[in-house]
Amino acid sequence: MSDLAGKLKEWTGEARLPELIQHHYGIRLKEARPVGGILRLDSDQGVFVLKRVPVREDLRWNLLRELADYLPQSGEGLLTGPIRSKRGGVTVSGHHHRYVLLPWIRGEIRDLREGGRWEATARSLAGFHVATQGFSPSRSAASGLVHTGHWRRIWRDLSRQVHMFKLTANLSDEPSPVDQLWLRQCAYAEGMLETADRYFEKLGGDRTVVATRKGGEVCHCNIHRRNLIWGPEGRVRLIDWNRAVLDVRSRDLARLILYAYGRTGLYEPTTAILKAYQERAPLEEAEYALIYAQLLFPHRILRSLQRIYQEQKIPPHLAKGHLSSVMETEDRKEGLLREFPQLIHRDFNVSIPRVDWLEKRLSI
């Protein structure tokens, strides 16, 4: 146990983590190892995951616990909730950090580009969204996590952040390489923010979002291959709920479509995803346009800027390369933005508003 305690102290800074786990959960640790940013814990009661809870993230884990209690016991909702401590808490405090304990999900990570896995992922996502219909969390658990009906405010808050990041770079006495890159590229980001905002207003804004709530109440918001665990018979389970919020399903669908296009450079996965999703949960016409509005919004650029300027999680010597890569990825997205309205009309017989400047650029 002393060797295990020493390794855990090296990984977490906690000198008495085995005792902490036993005290709060009644679990005796046998072995532990880091796996992709979490700790796998082998114990006398099975295998578990220990995750560090960032500051101010307790509420999200309370929300996920309430959601896990709400979802069908069959596991249809794909969510395995955090384990409550002996005192009923969802997170526990160590000397340096807070933690959440989760069951270990057996399975493997797979390449989504093979074997109809875009479709399988979409069907599983539809099952999750359907299972969250009618979910109404406590006010305390939902605090700050309700995005349904607040897209306009959230987007405009993010636009103000972009302006502040621009000022930060512009007012620097000695602009760094990433400052110089951002100042050259900021006009594009500002243009996409304005495009998304105008398009959203044309759709009816937040009233339209609220009208689609019956399709589901919760979004994962971070769907990619490493957050999908494939079990027997192709069953898919979502993991890593660190960005989950209360929002409509069009947001998750947009993220999955964008990820598929980024991984393949092809339009076919978009049709495959939307068709497979609707085998379980048909979409309303307005939802296609909401998906497009989410595609227009430059989420990845904003997340990159937050990590560089606000959270300072990207080392200065890597910041320029990081932002450059994100900008290139965002630029490649333009092909999907031009094609999406035509694809939706061709494959689903649904007409959504188009963006004039994208149409004109196509004809140049």
Image: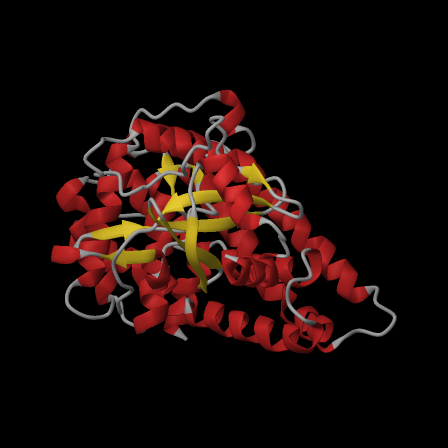
Left or right, 175 with reference to 9: right
Q: Residue at x 67, y 51 (%)?
A: 161
> Foreground: 91 or 250?
91
Q: Quadrant of residue 135?
A: top left
Q: Residue at x 59, y 57 (%)?
A: 12
Q: Residue at x 60, y 58 (%)?
A: 9
Q: Quadrant of residue 186?
A: bottom right
Q: Position of residue 313 (x, y in %)?
A: 64, 62
In the rendered view, tell whether residue 265 sits above or below residue 126.
below
As drawn, the residue found furthest toward the right would be 173
Q: Quadrant of residue 278?
A: top left
Left or right, 193 with reference to 223: right
Whether residue 353 is visible here, answered yes or no, is no
Whether residue 124 is visible here, answered yes or no, is yes
Instruction: Assign the C terminus to one quadrant of the image.
Output: bottom left
Left or right, 39 with reference to 11: left
Q: Position of residue 146 (x, y in %)?
A: 49, 32
> Foreground: 21 or 35?
21
Say how the picture is coloured. Answer: secondary structure
Q: Position of residue 354 (x, y in %)?
A: 37, 53
As drawn, the residue found furthest toward the front would be 2
In the rendered view, tell whether residue 136 sits above or below residue 318.
above
Marks counted in the figure total 0
> Foreground: 133 or 62?
62
> Foreground: 22 or 313?
22
Q: Position of residue 126 (x, y in %)?
A: 23, 43
In the rendered view, tell whether residue 31 sits above or below residue 51.
below
